[in-house]
Image (cartoon, coloured by chain):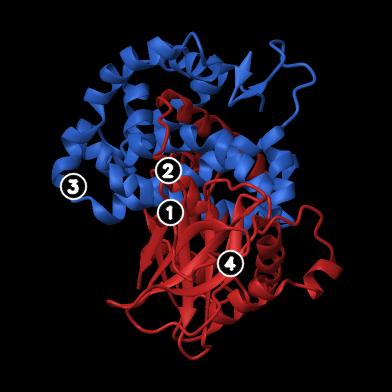
Amino acid sequence: MNEQEFAELSAASALGALDAEQQQAFDLALTMHPEWRGIAERDLETATALADYAPEVEPPAELRHHILTRVALAPQTDALPLGATPAPSTGAIQTQSRTRWMRSMFALAASFVLLVALGFTAVSINDWVNRPPEVVALQEVQSAPDAQSATAQIEGGGESTLYWADSVGKAVIVSDGLPQIADDQSYELWFVRGDESPIPAGAFAASGQRTETWILDGEMEPGDTIAITIEPAGGSPTGEPTSDAVVAIPT
Amino acid sequence: MVIDGMDVPDDGAGTVDHVAELLERIARGDHEAFASLYDMLSSRVFGLILRVVVDRSQSEEVLQEVFLEVWQSAARFAPNKGQGRSWVLTIAHRRAVDRVRASQASVDRDIRIGFRDIDVAHDGVAEQAELRIESRRVTEALTALPESQREALTLAYFGGYSQSEIAALVGAPLGTVKTRMRDGLSRLRAEMGVAS
């Protein structure tokens, strides 16, 4: 292949107009001729400028939450469920591009990021070693072969996602965008089970962070709906919800 | 002047590649940097994907794939090889084209985009040209191209067509289409004054 032929391949590659076979020929030529790398980079830069010919379009607001959640709770192996709708081809890219080394680095990075998502602004090794119990529980649940998740919208915006695994016997709820509460109030979790009165599953003060992560207190049963209400500090004194749920997640 | 929500000096002097900075932080697992990058570029990226993929729900899936890939491979971004923004847009474009090739029967692609698109897009872009210096630059540059070159570039970049498909669509020999792409891209670069 001479430089003239390469320039044609390079332009077409930058525009995304090569079929798989031609693309291989292009990649091979690039490997054989590092001196042509500049041509390829320049073409890619020019072709990419075409992107601005398309008008900008704001994506739906809920996608932001989906994407940030998927990234923050990125699984440590390819097989784990993610709560949000998985894009089918993501696994394929991961398989292609991630070596074992990359994978373990990624898992490590994901752990760090999880901490950041939970509100730790300065993440250090120390933070990682002293991961809060809900983070450890969440990772434990997500690593289980029978991990499941369910998501529901919070009243007034935001989402709560419940992660659980029967084999682990724990459930963790991650909420993004809960309504703010006063100092003398708590969020309270409930198991809503058939006709029974809701069963308290833990009361939590606001952490001051946008994302709240809690371990459910008590045994979840199949078919439970998990609800969050806003109650007086420490939880409802009567043992029953005193307000409407701000979110309810059927399982 | 404001680009992607960032204040940028009009003469380009002292311009900081904010996206590159964010990518470096993302490569170290910085979640806040990722959220900032998303807020800065998601409309730009989604607009591009939508133009190529057309179908809205598929475009939303591709948008997710793109940002996940950005997250996973930010460490591979090399600041000395180009702008961070281009790097993200390159991923977005490749993903969008992959999706179109994988999902679209060729039947409805002929009318989907391409020739028709060239004229339609002009009006829409002209409106926002006041606001967006990048789109004004590329629109003016494209307009300056000979029609056959412009057609080859837009069919490839926005239509997701391969060289041989374009040759069949426009009824020109494959060699001619290859030449038009190469010359069109060179001309575009010259018109836009893209640094080589």
Q: Which mark is residue A246?
A: 1
In 3D space, how far apart are the residues under numbered discs 4 and 3 (Cα atoms)? 57 Å
**Whether labels 1 and 4 share one chain:** yes
Circles 3 and 1, Cβ within 8 Å, touching? The answer is no
User: Which tag, 1 or 4, sits closer to the chain's start?
Assistant: 4
Task: Say whether residue B49 is visible.
Answer: yes
Quadrant of the rendered image containing residue B37: top right
Pointer 4 residue: A203
Query: Badge 2, how many Cα within 10 Å: few under 14, some, many 20+?
Result: few
Query: Badge 1, how many Cα within 10 Å: few under 14, some, many 20+?
Result: some
- Horizontal and vertical percent position of residue B147: 32, 17
| Colour chain B is painted in | blue
Residue farthest along the front direction in this orientation = A238
Q: Which numbered mark, 3 or 1, is in the foreground of this view? A: 1
Q: Nearer the viewer, residue B187 or A199?
A: A199
In 3D space, how far apart are the residues under numbered discs 3 and 2 (Cα atoms)? 43 Å
Q: Chain of mark 2?
A: A
Query: Badge 4, how many Cα within 10 Å: few under 14, some, many 20+?
Result: many
**Whether labels 3 and 2 share one chain:** no
In 3D space, how far apart are the residues under numbered discs 1 and 4 (Cα atoms)? 14 Å
SS type, badge 3:
helix
Q: Nearer the viewer, residue B2 or A17?
A: B2
State the quadrant of the N terminus of chain B: top right
Pointer 3 residue: B106
Inspect the image, locate mark 3, and give the three-letter code of the amino acid beneath it.
Ser
Q: Which numbered mark, 4 or 2, is in the foreground of this view? A: 4
User: Which tag, 1 or 2, sits closer to the chain's start?
Assistant: 2
Residue at x 27%, y 76% (from the top left corner): A195
Inspect the image, locate mark 1, and give the three-letter code of the amino acid beneath it.
Val
